[in-house]
Image: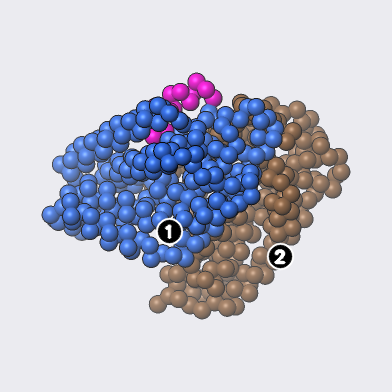
């Protein structure tokens, strides 16, 4: 455990060195969030009664989604993991006295976390001070805030575990670009980062909310904005936990299977 | 032109060397664009109109912007990824060759796997044309073509500007994506839905609305002034400052390679 934690710390520290990249990311995400809100506002003006959540809740959803983007976006991949499978340097990793799955797991956790830590605070703080329709509101009470943080953490673990499966697929296909693009598209859509899940048609939404993708950022962001309340919070968080454990176990199983047949590339 | 065709054939052949990979990436591109389309559909199932624009009108707008962006990305990819060319010193080689450097960068890289997204935009366009109530006279067809061409030129110019900025920063500037990817994503709706300030920015700073909003008004019959249909040509004048900036950048170029 200790060796993995130190690996996490190492990657984290090297990750937060990229400050100018983070600054560029913050500007990008800020503008992006603004455009999204303005777009939704036009729909809100068109027909406010058809809006499935309060406008304030939507605004909070968008800002928090932008702030924690690096934690949840499926397109953030550890290129050196993919590269090491492709060029065969994964062989060195296999020689070390560590397990590959947890090592990569912590590595991608650190990678995402270091990006998110640099970016989330400026975005959140700036959004808190905007004028009203664009303002990120504080959560309704302390309970909602702690449930949000818990759900955010589990969702984050789930995203990392899911990412692991896409890495493991590379062992089988080598050039996994195409498959990865399809997976990324699917995850983005069903996790609610193109349009939030409440905007889906009712009957489709009922099914989509049970999928693992809905347990990523969707739950946490909606707990924060008060869109999910009461007993439903517990149900959703349990579902998140279930999916995380399931995806984690599947990933471990696939990894063991891949290790049995692994062919090292390169020479 | 003949040389460009040679380059094109080489890129085509090299793309087809990895058939499965090429196919999968194209499918992936198709799929990603498809998901955005489903998002738009869900929004309109719920709201029916936005600022008076109907679903099929928005689809027209969406597909035109998507197509323009994709064409630009396919054929101007060399500028889009120019920071690599600068960083590994490849640009020195380009300068040594007896051809115009813009041509060489342009022809040096093409991203043909974007054909998947192109196909998606064609399907959406066809669907939009089928369902909307526009009567397709010759001037509307010309407008549509001008919009696509004008948009391609604008996106291409943006890529050239980013490449030119690389001469000074030596690395890609991520926040520039706001102007390309951002315009692709948010330009699926006519720009006036975002309010006055954004609209002004998209007219006077970067002339998106000249190929998207104004000709779109003419296309959907909201405006009868024939001048609106020619605005994409005016938008193409954006190429002049872009290329000037590029030339300026080339003059400042200091090699980084070894």
Is residue A211 highlighted in magenta? Answer: yes
Rendering coords of residue B239 (x, y %): 69, 61
Instruction: Name the residue carrying label 2.
Output: B240
Picture mark count: 2
> Of helix, strand and loop, which mostly describes the magenta segment?
helix
Q: Nearer the viewer, residue B84 or A81?
A: A81
The residue marked by circle 1 belongs to what chain?
A
Q: Kindly indicate which chain is depicted in brown in the rendered structure.
A: B
Rendering coords of residue B69 (x, y %): 60, 49
| Residue at (80% x, 40% y) in the render | B218
SS label for mark 1: helix
| Residue at (55% x, 51% y) in the render | A128
Q: Nearer the viewer, residue B103 or B26?
A: B26
Instruction: Select label 2 or label 1 by which is in front.
Output: 1
| Residue at (55% x, 73% y) in the render | B168
Q: Up-down: is B253 above or below A264?
A: below
Quarter of the picture holding the C terminus of chain A:
bottom left
Rendering coords of residue A118 (x, y %): 43, 59
Q: Kindly indicate which chain is depicted in blue in the rendered structure.
A: A
Instruction: Name the residue carrying label 1.
Output: A118
Which portion, as a residue range, is magenta? A201-218
Q: In this rendering, would B178 be left or right of A143? A: right
Q: In this rendering, would B108 be left or right of A77? A: right
Badge 1 crowding class, 10 Å Cα cut-off, few under 14, some 14 to 19, many 20 or more, is: many
């Amino acid at each position: 455990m200790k060796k993995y934690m130190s690996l996490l710390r190492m990657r984290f520290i090297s990750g937060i060195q990229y400050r100018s990249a983070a600054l560029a990311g913050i500007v990008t995400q800020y503008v992006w969030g603004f455009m999204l809100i303005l777009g939704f506002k036009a729909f809100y003006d068109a027909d406010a009664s058809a809006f499935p959540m309060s406008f304030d809740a939507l605004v909070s959803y968008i800002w928090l989604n932008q702030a924690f983007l690096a934690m949840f976006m499926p397109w953030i991949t550890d290129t050196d993991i993919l590269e090491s499978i492709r060029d065969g340097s994964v062989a060195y990793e296999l020689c070390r006295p560590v397990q590959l799955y947890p090592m990569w797991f912590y590595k991608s956790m650190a990678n995402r976390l270091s990006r998110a830590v640099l970016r989330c605070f400026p975005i959140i703080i700036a959004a808190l001070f905007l004028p009203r329709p664009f303002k990120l509101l504080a959560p309704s009470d302390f309970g909602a805030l702690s449930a949000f943080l818990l759900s955010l953490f589990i969702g984050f673990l789930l995203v990392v575990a899911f990412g692991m499966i896409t890495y493991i697929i590379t062992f089988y296909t080598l050039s996994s670009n195409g498959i990865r693009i399809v997976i990324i598209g699917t995850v983005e859509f069903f996790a609610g980062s193109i349009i939030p899940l409440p905007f889906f048609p009712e009957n489709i939404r009922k099914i989509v909310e049970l999928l693992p993708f809905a347990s990523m950022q969707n739950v946490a962001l909606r707990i924060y904005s008060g869109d999910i309340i009461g007993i439903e919070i517990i149900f959703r968080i349990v579902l998140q936990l279930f999916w995380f454990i399931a995806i984690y176990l599947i990933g471990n199983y696939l990894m063991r299977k891949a290790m049995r047949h692994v062919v090292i590339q390169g020479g | 032109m003949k040389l460009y065709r040679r380059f094109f054939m080489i890129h085509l052949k090299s793309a087809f060397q990895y058939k499965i990979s090429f196919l999968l990436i194209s499918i992936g591109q198709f799929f990603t664009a498809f998901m955005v389309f489903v998002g738009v559909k869900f929004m309109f199932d719920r709201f029916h109109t936005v600022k008076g624009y109907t679903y099929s009108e928005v689809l027209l707008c969406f597909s035109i912007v998507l197509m323009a962006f994709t064409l630009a990305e396919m054929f101007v990819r060399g500028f889009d990824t120019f920071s690599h060319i600068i960083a590994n010193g490849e640009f020195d080689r380009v300068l040594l060759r007896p051809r115009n450097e813009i041509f060489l960068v342009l022809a040096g890289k093409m991203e043909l796997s974007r054909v998947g997204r192109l196909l998606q935009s064609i399907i959406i366009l066809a669907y939009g044309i089928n369902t909307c109530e526009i009567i397709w006279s010759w001037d509307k067809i010309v407008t549509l073509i001008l919009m696509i061409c004008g948009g391609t030129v604008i996106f291409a110019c943006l890529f050239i500007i980013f490449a030119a900025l690389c001469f000074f920063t030596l690395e890609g500037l991520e926040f520039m994506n706001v102007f390309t990817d951002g315009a692709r994503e948010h330009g699926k709706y006519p720009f006036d839905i975002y309010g006055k300030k954004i609209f002004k920015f998209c007219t006077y700073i970067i002339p998106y609305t000249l190929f998207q909003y104004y000709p779109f008004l003419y296309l959907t019959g909201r405006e009868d002034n024939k001048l609106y249909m020619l605005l994409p040509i005016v938008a193409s004048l954006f190429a002049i400052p872009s290329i000037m900036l590029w030339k300026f950048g080339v003059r400042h170029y200091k090699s980084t390679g070894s």
